[in-house]
Image (cartoon, grey):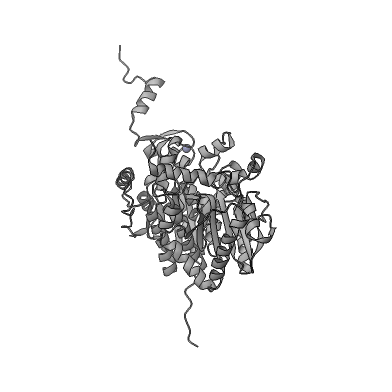
Amino acid sequence: MLQPKFTPPTAAELKKRRQAIPDRLAQRCPVCGKTFFRFQAGRCMTCPGCGYALRITARKRVKLLFDTFAETHADITVPDRFTDPAYRAKIAQAEKKTKLKESVLTGWATIADQRFAAGIMDPFFIMGSLGSATGEKITRLFEDATKAHAPVVLFTASGGARMQEGIVSLMQMAKVSQAVAAHSAAGLLYITVLCDPTTGGVTASFAQQGDIILAEPHALVGFAGRRVIEQTIHAQLPADFQRAETVLEHGFIDAIVPRDQQKTVLARLLRWHQPAPAKAVTSA
Amino acid sequence: MKTQREHRAYAAVQAARATTKIPIQTLIDDLVTDFFPLHGDRTGGDDPALIGGIGQLGDLPITIVGIQKGATTQENIARHFGSALPEGYRKALRLMKEAAKFRRPVLALINTPGAFPDKHSEDFGQGEAIARCLLEGMQLPTPILSVIVGEGGSGGALALACGDEVWMFQHSTYAILSPEGYASIMWKDATRAPEAAAKLGLTPKELLAEHIVDRVVTEVANADQAQDLAKAIHARLTGLLALSPEDLLARRHARYRHF
Ligand SMILES: [Zn+2]
């Protein structure tokens, strides 16, 4: 009798095999729970089940979205005065993971010949938290753009203020806000793209200060943490709480743009907001 | 075992939270005469935690915004334990803008553990409300002096402490989050709050050294003691009023730019 060439594995066996697959090959969507292989997420790293835009590094986002990119202020890093060994170890680990020296990557970018100052926060650099150097880089991003009369596009992804740096981290919210105000007073466009997760002090400052506020599908967007709120109100929160779609319904996001459409949408919005050429100074 | 530094830091936290702390409404009545409360955020709400209005400070009419904890359980529930809602921050900003229109100085009195963390506040844009205080409040061309009276908790305090000067009561604290919150996030152990308090550097002395605050003032417990504070505030606001709006904003910009 011929042996069958292939015996289909049992469901239990399949589950066991799936669990044995290294994380970088298969992953589970934190929003819809679907398990999928990395290649199924496609170039844009999107859940094939629900369209959730997976967390990606800042450098990956640059490759995905921009036609050209020239990094600025690459050497700004966590100041030496923060000497706590546990914090220093976290920074070293984050640098290795993200190829960045702080939680935001800044530079000059183009999409379809539209030039703008770009900031991309990296959720893999200590949760994209807002340290003093992060705040300094974002402040300079706005200052550079104001000087060059250029728009700013900022992708936010952050757990909020950086606890390890204490109150100085809180001051970054004020420092960046006044740079945003100066850029806005110059009549220039500021677009934020809220990525998963945008929370805490970042939501309570520059993430919510854009002229136009976009978000990625199902991105977590909020101020207080879910656990803190549940402890305060002694109740469970709905699954869609603080998801971009819910926040849009409440009026705090202009549009949700899937990753594969962001390039087209940004190009169009930038074109519609081209700064008026600086007025020539005429002598009396 | 608690080190001396931890002990001191946590004692400061407890003093800032003391139930004997002067209520903001009482302090307002002790500082100014004829206080006239103004209500509402003009978008559909009025947060009881956020007191706002105009009063007379010597020869100066001033706008006051303050976050008030409750003295009783009932009052505490009504005022969300001194945690403002988005409506509160929107009300504060509205009143500050009205003050700026008439170049009337603003005094912000702060005693809050932080912005209120509940579903309503999230749905109504707690983040956006604070972000707007920072974006627009910081640019208002009128003197803004903030005094942290008790707790100065996180972004909820910063929203009203981003003006020209920030002062602190002798027994007050200002931090990125509560020591309990820090301990539970960093070490998953809220009982290590004293250790967290020491790490946070939340005492007036430490914050003065870091130039986060500009002055530490003597604790005020009654109307008599409030007179010295009233004089100091009046002197400072008068000094700031003498600056041109351009100079005032340039000075304010420099204050935050160096952080
Ligand atoms: Zn999914």
Is residue A221 something one can see in this rendering? no
Residue A254: x, y in percent? 56, 53
Residue B146: x, y in percent? 54, 58
Q: Is residue A104 left or right of residue A224?
A: left
Q: Is residue B234 left or right of residue B206?
A: right
Q: Residue at x 39, y 42 (%)?
A: B4
Q: Is residue A233 left or right of residue A72?
A: right
Residue nearest the observer in this picture, A23 or B150: B150
Q: Is residue A105 above or below residue B11?
A: below
Is residue B103 something one can see in this rendering? yes
Residue A252: x, y in percent? 57, 51
Residue lying at the far bottom of the rendered structure: A284
Q: Residue at x 32, y 51 (%)?
A: A100
Residue nearest the observer in this picture, A168 or A150: A168
Residue B52: x, y in percent? 64, 56
Residue B80 is drawn in which quadrant? top right
